[in-house]
Image (cartoon, rainbow, N blue to C red):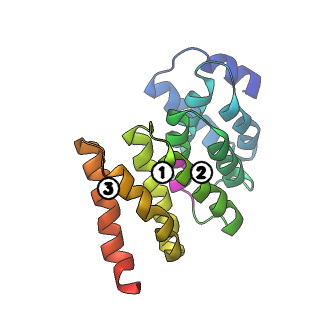
Amino acid sequence: MMPAQLAERLQAPISKAEAGALAGNLRTRPAELLQFLPLLASDQPGVAWRMAWILATLAERRFRPPKGYAEGLAQALAKTAEPAVARCIGRALLALPPYGHELEGIVADACLAWLDDPGVPVSTASIMIDLYLELCHRYPELWRELEPRLERLSRHDGTGWTATLGKARRFYHLNLAHKR
């Protein structure tokens, strides 16, 4: 399937089973995967988030990504304005092995930008926090950037926010408190 064909197919709603089948198809042809990444920036309704959903599904299947895949995801995360797309890209990035200092900087900046958005949905914020905490494992000094955002986000009500912020605080106490 070519990117134009997939874009056409993704204009209509797809089921979870269809997303899984498409992810399986891409898993068997990882070298061709890079040509589908531009669909993450599609302005056609629904195409970007459906493509991101397929990539998040693919990430759950533990595959060996082609060279340039992490870069494409990092760039897409930095550019997207859609919370659902960002959330799925974040899930895909979480499944990857470390992808290099430069890309990690792009991802960190994108995560913080999402957390600075006062209207960010808790589900997107949760993934961005998870992704940022993954970076904090390797670069503990990044916690200083996250801490004030967590303080601001703690003013939100709801169990989703409580669980998300509690997870971040547990991470700090288990991994970073002793390093201060």
The residue labelled by disc 2 is 110
Q: Residue furthest top?
A: 12
- How many numbered discs, if any? 3
Residue 2 can be seen, yes or no = no
Q: Is residue 18 above or below residue 76?
A: above
| Mark pair 3, 2: CA separation | 19 Å
User: Could you classify mark 2 by the number of other residues whose Cα lies within 10 Å: few (under 14), some (14-19), or many (20 or more)?
Assistant: many
Q: Is residue 122 above or below residue 69?
A: above
Kind of residue sitting beneath label 3: Leu
Say whether residue 92 is magenta. Answer: yes
Which residues lie in the magenta part? 90-96
Kind of residue sitting beneath label 1: Met
Q: Quadrant of residue 58?
A: top right
Q: Secondary structure at mark 3?
A: helix
Q: Which mark is residue 128?
A: 1
Where residue 64 sits: x, y (%)?
A: 62, 55
Q: Quadrant of residue 176?
A: bottom left
